[in-house]
């Protein structure tokens, strides 16, 4: 019988079961009605009759649950049958399978995903509305010469002049904004900074602002503010609230930290913003209006979009390439509306102020001449601990010098105003950890107030100067720039689109090094992100289910929620622009790593506790035991600076629970370690599953005899749990892999074990190849590295060569460090001292080529799955350069694609930014951050590299992609850190390489739907959990929480339980955060292994199968504002690229 007929047969069986079950239910209800006849129409129900009705409803729910279980069992049978039909004999027992002809696992029919053309052509005809000037940053780069002539007192700018009477008709408005930038870790740890400096700044603030209502202060980092708040009494808290109400203290941005904008993923950017804003709402009642980002090393439009979605109207940025700043200053475009590339109107516009000068410290904020501005930083008065580098100190303001000093300062304010299109001037007054001493508050505020009083009392100066907050400034700027409050447009201000990478602060000093610095912790960050998101979703589902079952007191909700809160805050802390960037002191990095490590352990506990409740068939048997948990993860990370390792399961009979944290039904390869190769693997319903067994290699050529890898394809529903049983078998029921070992010109001795077959061929010159049903790749027999890739559907081969290269550092005085990448020229090829050992593995579930070099262990793997995981090449690099001196190692992919000088990188995993390799820029300037992907393309083909960690990437030549994987640098790069980067770890980097055919070219480039889903699978792998042997008597049931998978282009960013208004525990509300991905229609949507479609952004609120949604209320991104009048929505509607948050009540 053909496979299609068997599918038809079992499909008919499912239909019959459903119909028959419904008939039985209706018949049963009819019998109940006969036995209990109604007393007549129009009569009121008695309480006894209501009880009978409730019993009928409960019975109906039980019948439906039984019916769902029957259907699930039949579905398992169909899948098992499809596997067995692919087997040579069709037998469910796999012990006698051929070791040569490997079957396709879970073969799927040629499915075409139904896609609405409007879903991916939304930005094809991008145009600027309202006749506004649009500046594309890529076009601006084309215009600039990137020279650096001496600009006079403003070294990177130009001389500024003005006429004295320019302000006669419209006076100059000056807002001096006192601020203190508090890094949550850099040269000291977060706690040390708080103890030594931050708490004193905030304590002084309460006292000193109350002394004079004209004084102002700006604060940003809620991580510090919340720690301080917990230490102060109610009287001081009330004093802080009164300062906020009077407008003296402004909380700007309000995130947990001021995040880096290059390496951060948008999930974590949102999460730290949400954590800060929720804390403010619960404790202070503040809703930030303006973004403030003076120190991130370059700026991303993703942050702009998130601020806008959170309800903010304005923002400020500082660290932008000095040539870009100069160009914007010449054009007077330093204030602009920042718009997203896909936006065809003004809905994403946010008013942005770019600070024009070198830094955010006082010498570079009052005007163009730092020598003069430094004289108005009164902390540098003679006798203090810091002074002016220009050797002209400030003077205390008195009656004798106030005129001369006021006119000198006003001259700087006037010159600064000439760079803008209005007469409103911003002059920040602060620096890192300023105002920590009471004396500085007095020095700054008293002296400046005397200067303001003089200026304001002389109308012939035509100036009004005052202390202000950043929102005070924007409130004055908007009417001055004729910003329409309804349309949010201005005839004076341009619209800018694009990003501000890569940052350079002087000369050829490009800050592209930090895109890769400390890559071990960049990877650890993404592991915590994935685990936190998975735990949030599972906890929210479990909590709603517990509430529905009225078992609230049995489930450790408070304990788990506290662990989630701590993990949110530790992840948020690591998004700080000196944390994820890898630019902190060694011991500060250890502190961050320890926090990440402990939070990973804690969210694993939350997942295990939540899955325990959800997977248990008999909820009455639920007992929580923290000392003896039902479930535990199958891997262990021994320390914060070590790679995780798999636990070895000792088999008799063990249950394995697998969790799918993605919103799509999934067929993914799962690997666990077992103590025997003789394993029988079954589904929860008892059906045999094909499994591959392979060796665990303790050394390059020595296999363990105590541990074996068991790999199989698990089917897990969206956000669901699936149960498998592993039993030790008497005979071999798994399919062992075959190994081939090669090493050029040397004898090899391989210490293997049964049941594996090992081949060491005499002729080691023939190319190596591995394949799956979709792809075949050829590798060099000398290097083990990929050379050619072929996609079988089209039959076209492409040269795609993988190699490794070294970068050194320049011999000039300034050298590469944690921030800067200053190479000594083009990269040099990686040439190992000894020929590598190449191990070729061929198996029924996956095949791979592993090559062991001195500095990197490189693996290419193909999964034997038709669907998402079978359509790309997995690349794993374990890098170790701990013994190197001033070297950086990169992976270079060289293809035959004619990509010219164009390539594309993602920004924060959210959007794509076109790049152009520019010969007029130094090599290091052409590197950009890659958070999740980069690609090159020609008219008919795209090559995409997807990554599981943030790294620096470039395309220095046509057809190339190059990724810096680790850096070891022996010296400081003179940006304040005071050390090199020498704390390297053995680091695991994980990638997927995807080659796709294209049909057309649109003006704006987006990832394909396939690359979106592949990236999601790479960053959110399925999570195996092992049932403790103590609980073998319990019965487990698979969980399918969604009625259906979400539309293909809709991503569930988070399902985050909201904290209760009182106490530290959870509420009954969750934040549902959805993102509608933008994607290209130029790519095939056949055979993707997805059973979903696109729906033009429509998502039903009836998402869940067993939980009911009580209300869906739209809110701003961080829940600060309720939208649409707080009305619950029947249907969710998302625009392309939109991220939306909803308050949802589940029951």
Image (cartoon, rainbow, N blue to C red):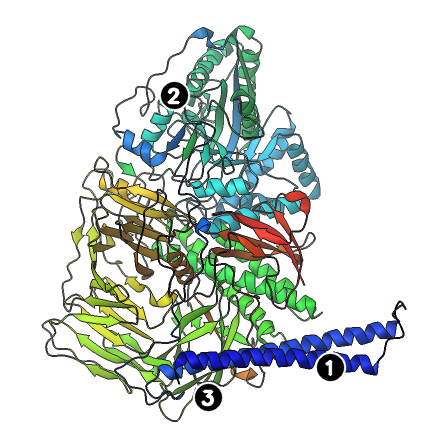
Q: Position of residue 215 (x, y in %)?
A: 60, 26
Q: Position of residue 1091 (x, y in %)?
A: 46, 66
Task: Give SS at disc 3.
Answer: loop
Please name whichever residue, 640 or 174, is drawn nearer the observer in this view of the structure: 174
Q: Nearer the viewer, mark 1 or mark 2?
A: 1
Q: Nearer the viewer, mark 2 or mark 3?
A: 3
Q: Which residue is mark 1?
A: 28
Q: Residue 240 lies in what quarter of the image?
A: top right
Task: Give SS at disc 2.
Answer: loop
Give the distance between the C-alpha atoms of the residues marked 1 and 2, in whole angstroms.
Answer: 86 Å
Sooner in the amino-acid sequence: mark 1 or mark 2: 1
Q: Which mark is residue 652?
A: 3
Task: Give SS at disc 1.
Answer: helix
Residue 655 in view here: no
Q: Is residue 90 left or right of residue 801?
A: right
Q: Is residue 1010 left or right of residue 507?
A: right
Q: Residue 92 lies in what quarter of the image?
A: bottom left
Please name whichever residue, 741 or 358, is drawn nearer the observer in this view of the structure: 741
Q: Is residue 797 above or below residue 268?
A: below
Q: Is residue 577 above or below residue 546?
A: above
Q: Nearer the viewer, mark 3 or mark 1?
A: 1
Sooner in the amino-acid sequence: mark 3 or mark 1: 1
Residue at 50% from the left image edge and 43% from the top image edge? 306
Quarter placement of the C terminus = bottom right
- Asked if the residue under mark 2 is in contact with the one under mark 1, i.e. CB atoms within 8 Å, the reply is no
Q: Which mark is residue 368?
A: 2
Neighbours of disc 3 within 10 Å: few (<14), some (14-19), many (20+): few
Neighbours of disc 1 within 10 Å: few (<14), some (14-19), many (20+): some
- Asked if the residue under mark 1 is in contact with the one under mark 3, i.e. CB atoms within 8 Å, the reply is no
């Amino acid at each position: 019988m053909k496979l299609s007929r068997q599918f038809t047969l079992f499909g008919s069986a499912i239909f019959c079961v459903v119909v028959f079950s419904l008939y039985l239910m209706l018949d049963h209800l009819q019998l109940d009605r006969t036995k209990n006849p109604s007393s007549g129409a129009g009569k009121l129900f008695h309480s006894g009759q209501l009880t009978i009705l409730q019993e009928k409803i409960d019975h109906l729910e039980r019948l439906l649950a039984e019916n769902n279980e029957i259907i699930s069992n039949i579905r398992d049978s169909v899948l098992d049958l499809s596997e067995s039909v692919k087997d040579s004999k069709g037998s469910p027992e796999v012990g006698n399978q051929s070791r040569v002809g490997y079957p396709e696992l879970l073969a799927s029919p040629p499915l075409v995903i139904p896609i609405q053309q409007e879903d991916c052509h939304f930005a094809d005809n991008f145009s600027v509305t309202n006749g506004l000037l649009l500046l594309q940053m890529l076009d601006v780069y084309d215009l600039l010469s990137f020279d650096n002539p001496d600009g006079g007192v403003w070294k990177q700018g130009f001389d500024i002049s003005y006429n004295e009477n320019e302000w006669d008709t419209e006076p100059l408005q000056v807002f001096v904004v006192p601020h203190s930038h508090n890094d949550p870790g850099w040269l000291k740890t977060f706690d040390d900074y708080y103890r030594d400096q931050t708490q004193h700044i905030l304590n002084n603030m309460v006292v000193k602002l109350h002394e004079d209502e004209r004084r102002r202060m700006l604060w940003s980092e809620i991580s510090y503010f919340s720690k301080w708040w917990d230490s102060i009494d109610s009287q001081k808290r009330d004093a802080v609230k009164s300062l906020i109400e009077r407008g003296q203290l402004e909380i700007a941005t309000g995130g947990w930290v001021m995040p880096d904008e290059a390496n951060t993923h948008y999930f974590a950017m949102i999460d730290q913003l949400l954590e800060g804003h929720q804390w403010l709402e619960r404790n202070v009642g503040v809703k930030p209006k303006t973004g403030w980002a003076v120190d991130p090393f370059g700026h991303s439009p993703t942050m702009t979009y998130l601020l806008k979605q959170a309800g903010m109207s304005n923002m400020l940025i500082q660290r932008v390439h000095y040539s870009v700043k100069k160009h914007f200053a010449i054009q007077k475009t330093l204030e602009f509306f920042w718009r997203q590339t896909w936006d065809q109107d003004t809905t994403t516009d946010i008013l942005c102020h770019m600070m024009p000068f070198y830094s955010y410290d006082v010498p570079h904020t009052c005007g163009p001449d730092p020598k003069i501005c430094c004289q108005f930083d009164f902390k540098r008065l003679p006798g203090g601990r810091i002074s002016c580098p220009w050797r002209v100190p400030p003077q205390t303001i008195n009656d004798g010098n106030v005129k001369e000093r006021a006119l000198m300062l006003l001259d700087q304010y006037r010159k600064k105003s000439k760079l803008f299109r209005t007469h409103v001037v911003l002059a920040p007054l602060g620096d890192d950890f300023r105002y920590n001493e009471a004396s500085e508050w007095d020095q700054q505020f008293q002296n400046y107030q005397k200067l303001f009083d003089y200026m304001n009392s002389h109308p012939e100066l035509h100036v009004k100067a005052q202390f202000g907050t950043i929102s005070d400034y924007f409130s004055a700027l908007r009417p001055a720039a004729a910003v329409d409050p309804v349309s949010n447009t201005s005839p004076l201000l341009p619209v800018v689109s694009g990003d501000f990478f890569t940052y350079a602060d002087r000369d050829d000093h490009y800050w592209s090094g930090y895109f890769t610095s400390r890559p071990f912790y960049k990877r650890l960050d993404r592991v915590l992100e994935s685990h936190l998101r998975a735990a949030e979703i599972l906890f929210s589902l479990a909590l709603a289910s517990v509430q529905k079952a009225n078992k609230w007191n049995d489930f450790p909700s408070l304990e788990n929620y506290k662990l989630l809160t701590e993990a949110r805050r530790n992840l948020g802390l690591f998004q700080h622009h000196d944390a994820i960037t890898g630019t902190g002191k060694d011991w500060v990095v250890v502190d961050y790593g320890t926090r990440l490590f402990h939070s990973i352990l804690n969210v694993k506990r939350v997942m295990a506790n939540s899955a325990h409740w959800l997977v248990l068939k008999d909820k009455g048997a639920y007992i929580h035991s923290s000392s003896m948990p039902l479930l535990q993860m199958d891997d262990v990370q021994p320390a914060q600076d070590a790679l995780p390792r798999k636990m070895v399961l000792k088999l008799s009979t063990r249950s394995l629970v697998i969790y799918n944290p993605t919103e799509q039904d999934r067929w993914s390869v799962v690997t666990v370690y077992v103590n025997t190769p003789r394993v029988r693997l079954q589904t929860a319903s008892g059906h045999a599953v094909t499994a591959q067994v392979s060796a665990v290699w303790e050394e390059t050529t020595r296999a363990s005899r105590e541990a074996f890898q068991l790999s199989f394809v698990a089917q897990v529903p969206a956000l669901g749990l699936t149960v498998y049983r592993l039993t030790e078998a008497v005979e071999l029921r798994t399919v062992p892999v075959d190994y081939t070992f090669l090493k050029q010109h040397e004898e090899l001795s391989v210490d293997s074990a049964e049941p594996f077959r090992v081949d060491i061929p005499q002729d080691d010159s023939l190319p190596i190849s591995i394949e799956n049903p979709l792809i075949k790749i050829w590798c060099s027999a000398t290097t083990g590295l990929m050379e050619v890739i072929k996609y079988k559907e089209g039959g076209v081969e492409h040269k795609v060569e993988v190699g490794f290269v070294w970068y050194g550092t320049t011999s000039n005085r300034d050298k590469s460090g944690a921030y800067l990448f200053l190479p000594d020229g083009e990269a040099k090829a990686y040439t190992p001292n000894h020929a590598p050992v190449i191990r070729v593995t061929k198996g029924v579930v996956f095949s791979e080529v592993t090559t062991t070099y001195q500095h990197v262990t490189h693996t290419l793997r193909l999964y034997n799955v038709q669907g998402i995981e079978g359509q790309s090449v997995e690349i794993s690099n374990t890098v170790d350069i701990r013994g190197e001196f001033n070297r950086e190692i990169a992976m270079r992919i060289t293809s035959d694609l004619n990509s010219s000088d164009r390539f594309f990188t993602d920004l924060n995993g959210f959007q794509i930014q076109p790049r152009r390799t520019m010969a007029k820029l130094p090599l290091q300037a052409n590197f950009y951050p890659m958070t999740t992907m980069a690609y090159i393309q020609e008219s008919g083909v795209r090559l995409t590299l997807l990554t599981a960690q943030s790294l620096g990437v470039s395309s220095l030549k046509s057809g190339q992609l190059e990724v810096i994987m680790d850096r070891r640098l022996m010296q400081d790069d003179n940006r304040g850190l005071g050390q090199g980067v020498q704390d390297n770890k053995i680091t695991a980097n994980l990638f997927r390489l995807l080659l796709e055919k294209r049909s057309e070219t649109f003006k704006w480039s987006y990832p394909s739907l396939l690359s979106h889903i592949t990236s999601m699978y790479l960053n959110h792998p399925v999570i195996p959990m092992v049932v403790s042997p103590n609980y073998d008597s319990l019965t487990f049931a698979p969980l399918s929480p969604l009625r259906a998978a979400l539309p293909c282009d809709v991503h569930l960013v988070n399902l985050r339980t909201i904290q209760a208004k009182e106490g530290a525990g959870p509420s009954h509300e969750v934040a549902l955060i959805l993102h509608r991905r933008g994607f290209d229609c130029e790519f095939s949507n056949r055979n993707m292994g997805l059973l979903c479609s696109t729906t033009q952004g429509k998502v039903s609120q009836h998402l869940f199968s067993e939980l009911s949604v009580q209300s869906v209320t739209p809110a701003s991104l961080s829940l600060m504002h309720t939208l649409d009048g707080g009305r619950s929505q029947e249907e969710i509607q998302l625009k392309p690229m939109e991220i939306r948050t909803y308050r949802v009540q589940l029951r």
